[in-house]
Structure formats: C-alpha cells, structure tokens
C-alpha cells in the first residue's frame, strides 16, 4: 500500500501528544477529586442527619413514656444513689437544671391511684422502666439520666404544684466521636395531673 504525502501528514496527526495526555489526565484527576469530595460531604451529612434523627427518636420515646406515666400518677418520689429520699426544691428552671446534676444515678418511682408502681433508673447505658417486667429504653445509648423533684411556690411560699425535672443525655448511634456526632441532651418538666 502506498501513502501519498498528504495522507501521511493526516495519519501522523490522528494521535495525542504526551503533553495533551498529561493535560487530559490532570483535568480528569481534578474533576474526580471534586466529585469525590462532594460525595464524601453528602455522605457525612447523611450520617450526621441519620444519627441526629435516631437520637431524637430515642429521646422522644423516653419523654413520651415518662409523660404518659406521670399523667396517670397519684404521686412520685426520687431517691438518690444511696436510696435517700430527695426532697423537692423550690427553684427556677436553671437552678433545677443545676440541681439535677447532683441527682445522677437517682431512681424515680411513680405510684398510680390503684397502688401500682413503676420505677425508672439508669442501669449502665440503658434507662430501665420497671413494672412487672423490665423494659430497656434508649437502646443501650443512655449516657446520663437524672431526676430532680421541684416545686413551684406562690409568692406567699405555698406549694402550688410539684414538678419533676428529667435530664437525659443520649449517645450518638455511630461510633464516631467527631464534631458531627455529639450527644443530645433533653431537659423537661413533667407533673402528675392529680
């Protein structure tokens, strides 16, 4: 086969030069890096969102359980780690929140009008609701639980009603301890209806 000079020139120009290949590879690497970084960021945000949603669900379930029991309660009492009765404190929210830290490892006993009792207490990394059978609340992710009885006082110093301050910290569902996966804390007041 015989190639003319014009055919030979067009044949030589069909390939890439080494410089063109290096530029193409560099552009591909930069685009790949940006795509990987973007997808990695989306993945981290997804994990963070899932962990936060899961922790919020755990806290919501605990809140609903305690609130439902308190709605049916005739009375409640809190005992400290030494089994001493914790007296209600007349306090504002912030003072009670500080007092709740003193009541770590406390036990809450709720008495219903029929005389039945339910106990809540922390056992390791679980919050236990004990009636006839123990029920594990928090899926082994409870970091801290404290119960603090509080009373609301009138200007004359009379007790208007008693409240229970509950503080709960839940660990994230992932093993990661970076900034995106902090513990969630919930503080709330509940009171018996009676």
Image (tube, helix red, strand yellow):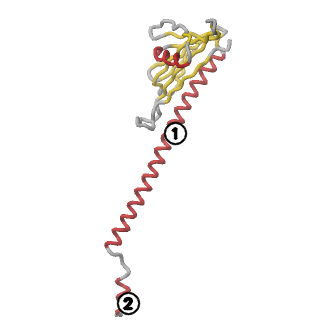
Q: Residue 135 sits in which quadrant? A: top right
Q: Observer-nearest residue: 8 or 158?
A: 158
Q: Residue 14 sits in which quadrant? A: bottom left
Q: Observer-nearest residue: 82 or 128?
A: 82
- Disc 1 target residue: 50
Residue located farthest toward the left when viewing the structure as drawn: 18
Q: Observer-nearest residue: 104 or 154?
A: 154
Q: Residue 1 sits in which quadrant? A: bottom left
Instruction: Tell me, for residue 128, which label it has, or none.
Output: none
x, y percent for residue 188: 57, 22
Secondary element type, mark 2: helix
Mark 2–mark 1 Cα distance, whole angstroms, equals 63 Å
Residue 116 appears in view? no
Asked if residue 166 is positioned above or below residue 44 in the image, the reply reads: above
The C terminus, quarter of image: top right
Asked if residue 168 is positioned above or below residue 46 in the image, the reply reads: above
Q: Which residue is drawn at 65% across and 10% down?
A: 160
x, y percent for residue 38: 46, 52
Secondary element type, mark 1: helix
Question: Is 166 placed left or right of 38 in the picture?
Answer: right
Q: How crowded is mark 2: few (under 14 residues within 10 Å), some or many (20 or more)?
A: few
Mark 2 or mark 1: which comes first in sequence? 2
- Disc 2 target residue: 7
Q: How crowded is mark 1: few (under 14 residues within 10 Å), some or many (20 or more)?
A: some
Task: State how many labels appear.
Answer: 2
Residue located farthest toward the front when viewing the structure as drawn: 155
* Tag 2 near tag 1, CB within 8 Å: no
x, y percent for residue 77: 56, 9
Residue 142 appears in view? yes
x, y percent for residue 99: 49, 15
């Amino acid at each position: 086969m015989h190639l003319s000079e014009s055919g030979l020139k067009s044949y030589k120009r069909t390939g890439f030069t080494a410089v063109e290949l290096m530029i193409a590879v560099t552009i591909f690497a930069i685009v790949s890096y940006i795509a990987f970084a973007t997808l990695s960021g989306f993945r981290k945000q997804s994990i963070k969102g899932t962990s936060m949603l899961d922790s919020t669900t755990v806290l919501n379930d605990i809140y609903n359980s305690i609130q439902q029991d308190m709605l049916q309660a005739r009375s409640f009492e809190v005992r400290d780690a030494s089994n001493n009765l914790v007296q209600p404190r007349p306090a504002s929210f912030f003072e009670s929140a500080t007092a709740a830290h003193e009541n770590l490892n406390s036990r809450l006993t709720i008495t219903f009008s029929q005389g039945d009792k339910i106990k809540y207490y922390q056992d390791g990394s679980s919050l236990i609701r004990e009636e006839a059978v123990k029920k594990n609340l928090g899926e082994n992710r409870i970091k801290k639980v404290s119960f603090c009885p509080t009373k609301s006082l009138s200007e004359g110093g009379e007790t208007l009603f008693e409240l229970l301050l509950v503080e709960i910290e839940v660990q994230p569902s992932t093993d990661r301890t970076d900034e995106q996966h902090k513990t969630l804390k919930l503080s709330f007041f509940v009171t018996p209806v009676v």
